[in-house]
Amino acid sequence: MAADTAKAAVGLRSDRGAILGSLMLATGLIALDSTIIATAVLSITESLGDFAQFPWLFSIYLLAQAVTVPVYGKIADMVGRKPVILFGIAVFALGSLLCGLAGSMLWLIVFRAVQGIGAGAVQPMTMTIAGDVYTLTERAKAQGYLAGVWALSSVAGPLLGGVFADFVGWRWIFLVNLPLSAWAAWMLSRHFTESVPRQRSRLDYPGAILLTAGAGALILGLLEGGRAWAWDSPAGIGTFAGGAAALLLFVVVERRAANPILPLRLFTRRVVVASSVVSLLVGALILGLTSYVPTFTQGVLGASALVSGLTVGALTLGWPISASQSGRVYLRIGFRFTAVLGSTLGSLGAFAMLFIGPGSSIGQIAATCFLIGLGMGLVASPTLIAAQTAATWSERGVVTSANMFARSIGSAVGVAVFGALVNSRVGDSGVPDPAALADGVHLVFVAVLVMTVTMVGACALMPGRSGSGR
């Protein structure tokens, strides 16, 4: 009885605690590097120059991470999760070392791409391994731990970046990843074992190349359109046209492939489609709030950078609180009603944001962010777990990666849509007028409301008490 209780326990002190701890550490590495350089941009550009190129430090990392996720998911279903995540950690560590030694902005951008290639393996594998190691009953609590790491990292990243930049040098933002990566890899090597079904199959190289090229062009166009080039310029149109052509050819190739990199039949399952749509909306929504709530509090309300960061931090505080409890909820009322409840809470929070203006208080903004975070915690984890539950072991890596890929696409779409909305009011002024900025960010809040309401509809398509919806 005691052994059964220990086996059923989920936490760092349980018999699987070392695996959970290593997954949390690997997740933290990736999450931190998404935000840690935000407060070190000036230090980096003072050292390396080329200030105009610094946005690529963010874009190239997101791009490299997003386009490799589906490929890693398929490989993990063929050879196992352990070699894929260890490879990802090794590549991420190599990229970190090279970033720390970079002698120019160009090389730093290239090495950030190497980091992103490694991150593309680590992010979905932590979620997939959690799906393998834990039962349906345990999974939401385990995902709650991982969500907590993301929340802490999103708040701590900019703070740590500032500390490193001010006191020990910006290069240590990357070099600190080396011992942490070694620790995570050692823990996974020692404590995580898996039994991989034997199968003889070749990787679908044409599909992998076409998906990477097509998705890469699409995300690049969304990230850089209106910034590096005009939307209607030859570069902008050519990027989207090339991406669309590659993706259309990818669909043709996948229909004929014996072992497709992204089996299109998975998207005949209602649960996979619904969870991917939800993930896309979550990616866009979080990007919009984490980008423009601080901008509003600083540019309109006159708050400090620290206060602005803590304000939007309420979003990432509510998320893990509800995510850690979502298992109890969906086991009682099912995936569908849990996700609908969460998206409805998010919609209420988004509706409350419409009343935020120049006379609003920091507390009011933080409260609405907290409410949206509570809602998203009841949406993101249950929808992913429902999709994982509907998949066999040999499909779970692809299904999880498709979910993560959709979130990356959502983030890129969010960059384009929200940026266009704000720029429609602010224009090209170097320092935006507070009134114009308030109008622009208000449009972002309207778009967030539309997205959360759409999310309610997507969540209504989820299965009830099992992940077998098709």
Image (tube, helix red, strand yellow):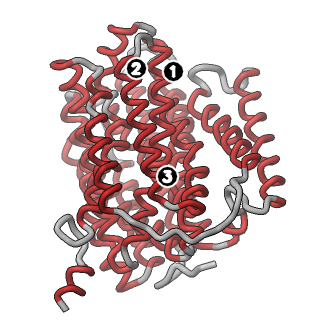
Mark closer to the chain start, 1 or 2: 1
Q: Distance between the Cα atoms at labels 1 and 2?
A: 8 Å
User: Which residue is identified by label 1?
Assistant: 427
Labels 1 & 3 near each other (Cβ < 8 A): no
Image quadrant where residue 322 sits? bottom left
Mark closer to the chain start, 3 or 2: 3
Pick the residue in front: 353 or 342: 342
- Give the mark toward the camera: 3 or 2: 3
Q: In percent of the image, x 72 and y 25: which residue is there?
A: 232
Q: Quadrant of the C terminus?
A: bottom right
Residue type for callout 1: Gly
- Asked if residue 344 can be seen in this view, the reply is no
Q: Quadrant of the N terminus?
A: bottom left
User: Which residue is identified by label 2?
Assistant: 432
Q: In percent of the image, x 51 and y 41: which residue is there?
A: 65
Q: Which mark is residue 31?
A: none
Image quadrant where residue 275 sits? bottom right
Image quadrant where residue 19 sits? bottom left
Label 3's element?
helix
User: Which residue is identified by label 3?
Assistant: 84
Q: In percent of the image, x 56 and y 60: which residue is there?
A: 79
Q: In percent of the image, x 35 and y 25: which residue is there?
A: 434
Residue type for callout 2: Pro
Binning the other alpha carbons within 10 Å of mark 2 as few (below 14), some (14 to 19) or many (20 upward) gives some
Give x and y (percent) for residue 374.
30, 62
Binning the other alpha carbons within 10 Å of mark 1 as few (below 14), some (14 to 19) or many (20 upward) gives some
Q: Distance between the Cα atoms at labels 1 and 3?
A: 45 Å
Q: Is residue 453 left or right of residue 22?
A: right
Pick the residue in front: 383 or 252: 252
Give x and y (percent) for residue 91.
45, 37
Residue type for callout 3: Val
Labels 1 & 2 near each other (Cβ < 8 A): yes
